[in-house]
Image: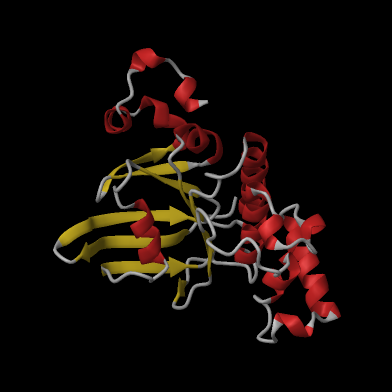
Amino acid sequence: MKECHCSIKVKNLKVKHGRNIILSDVTFSANHGETLALIGRNGAGKTTLLKAILNSVDYSGTIEFFNSEGEYISSPKIGYVPQRLSFDRNTPITVIDFICANYSSIPVWLGHGKKCREKAYNTLKKVGAENHIEKPIGKLSGGELQRVLLAFALEPRPDILLLDEPVSAVDRKGISIFYSIINSMRKEFHMPVILVSHDLGHVVKYATSYALINHTVAETGKASELPKSQKVRETFGLDVGRGEAIWE
């Protein structure tokens, strides 16, 4: 069995906003082939942690990336799917325009070459969105748009994939499809995934491990053991007497 090397190592990370400390002494690692869920109450710093990994906020401490052979990567390719995409729903841009913009600097109004069109189709097919290739992005449902954003994040193939509450605007069926795609990608490409989620049931069902964030890393563990965590129950105000519905 192939050794599972660390993909990302975060050590002593700290993020300040003015005088306010958002994150302090954050230390954790995630491995290739793992889906690590970041959980915690609103304002705990989960999204800020993703932004630090994306290098879009100032921070102190270290964030290091490694390939599947354990070799250091100085300039990692990071795929990112946001919670939502803010744009004008009346924009005439189609899905193929959006995807091809990731491949070329040629303006979309000049059209798309055969190679670009084929590449876009194959990328969308990976996430089950190839039938939407000619649709305006403003006409997509929440689940369809998230799959298109996932396709955008997967090309070029990232060294790590970040998901920030990616199914908050997706219906129940769409949630299952989205996470099935993520798990398939993770297994096929041994891709590490870091997921921010407010739904503990999704974490137990779809993640492999978790980190409880409360302005630092309060606890880590296997996702399957999440329902047993007293610290998680205390954080979210869960009572054992409420039964198991919260984990389903």
Q: Quadrant of residue 235?
A: top left
The image position of residue 28, as x and y in percent, is 33, 54
Residue, far left = 19
Q: In this view, does 97 lie above or below 142?
A: below
- Camera-side residue: 119 or 94? 94
Question: Where residue 183 appears, x then y in whole percent?
Answer: 62, 47
Does residue 164 appear to the left or right of 175 in the view shown?
left
Image coords of residue 107 (percent x, y)? 69, 85
Q: In screen coordinates, is 222 left or right of 229? A: right
Give the left or right position of residue 152, taking residue 95 as reference. left
Residue drawn 28% across and 32% down? 231
| Left or right of 227 on screen, residue 32 | right
User: Residue sitting at 38 percent across and 68 percent down?
Assistant: 64
In the image, residue 200 above or below residue 137: above
- Residue plotted at (30% across, 68% down): 62
- Residue situated furthest front in the rendering: 90
Identify the image quadrant of residue 8: bottom left
Vertically, is 28 above or below 105?
A: above
Q: Identify the residue shown where x is 62% and y is 53%.
A: 146
> Could you tell me residue 22's position as x and y percent?
23, 57
Q: Nearer the viewer, residue 14 or 44?
A: 44
